[in-house]
Amino acid sequence: MVAYCNRPTTTLHDVRFTPAGARESFAFTVTCGGNSAHGTWDTVNGLQCVEGDFFCDGPCTPMSSMDCRLQPNCEQLGQCGYQDGQCVLTDDGCAHSETSCGINGQCHLGPAGTCVVLTDDDCRMPFGMCSACEFKGACATEGKCTAENGACVAKSDDDCRSSQQCQFAGKCSLVVDECGAATDADCAASEVCRMAGQCTARDGICSAF
């Protein structure tokens, strides 16, 4: 039905790219008037499309991996697979997840069924692993550049100073295994100091008092 629509509305979800930057797969919804379709496309299987209303705009029971790939938890957390009426984590889902991989470096499916950190590269997010993610790993965001005991941790002041949290929140010094605001100088050049007057280091954060 939507194939004959003059002005369809198309929304892409879970877009994934090759290391070279070419699009390799995505999930989609297409709507036109009262008609809709949803499905997936990838370079191996091509287009897989289901006509009919997409029923998962609110709480729902998924019926296929197509349904799961259209849910926010696929892009955010890696729950892109389908099993027994539920969306479940997959290794590929973990590798492309915005929160688990893009922020925390948890880019692999572990034996306990959770997304986990395995190597320093997971923390540092090299291009190709999650190129579509807004965030580029725990190293870039929080200065946590080293894998240790299944998590990303901070190990040096240099890593902290290179992080987004240093520029934004003044967390530019190593405090145990994470970055924090150790001195007023850490806060002085931060966004929170310029924008909100939080220029004094207190208990690891920049404060206005």
Image: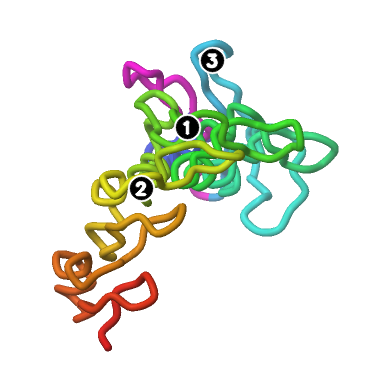
Q: Which residue is mark 1?
A: 122
In front here: 127 or 18? 127
Query: How many numbered markers are drawn?
Result: 3
Q: Earlier in the sequence, mark 1 or mark 3?
A: 3
Q: Which residues are magenta?
A: 15-33
Q: Residue at image x 55%, y 43%?
A: 151
Q: Earlier in the sequence, mark 1 or mark 2?
A: 1
The spot of residue 50 in percent (x, y) is 64, 31
Residue 148 is left or right of residue 113, and the answer is: left
Q: Amino acid at mark 3?
A: Gly
Quadrant of residue 44 within the rendered picture: top right
Q: Taken as a whole, is the magenta stretch helix, strand or loop?
A: strand
Element type where label 2 sits in the image? loop
In reply to whether residue 2 is colored magenta, the answer given is no
Q: Amino acid at mark 1?
A: Asp
Q: Earlier in the sequence, mark 2 or mark 3?
A: 3
- Quadrant containing the N terminus is top right
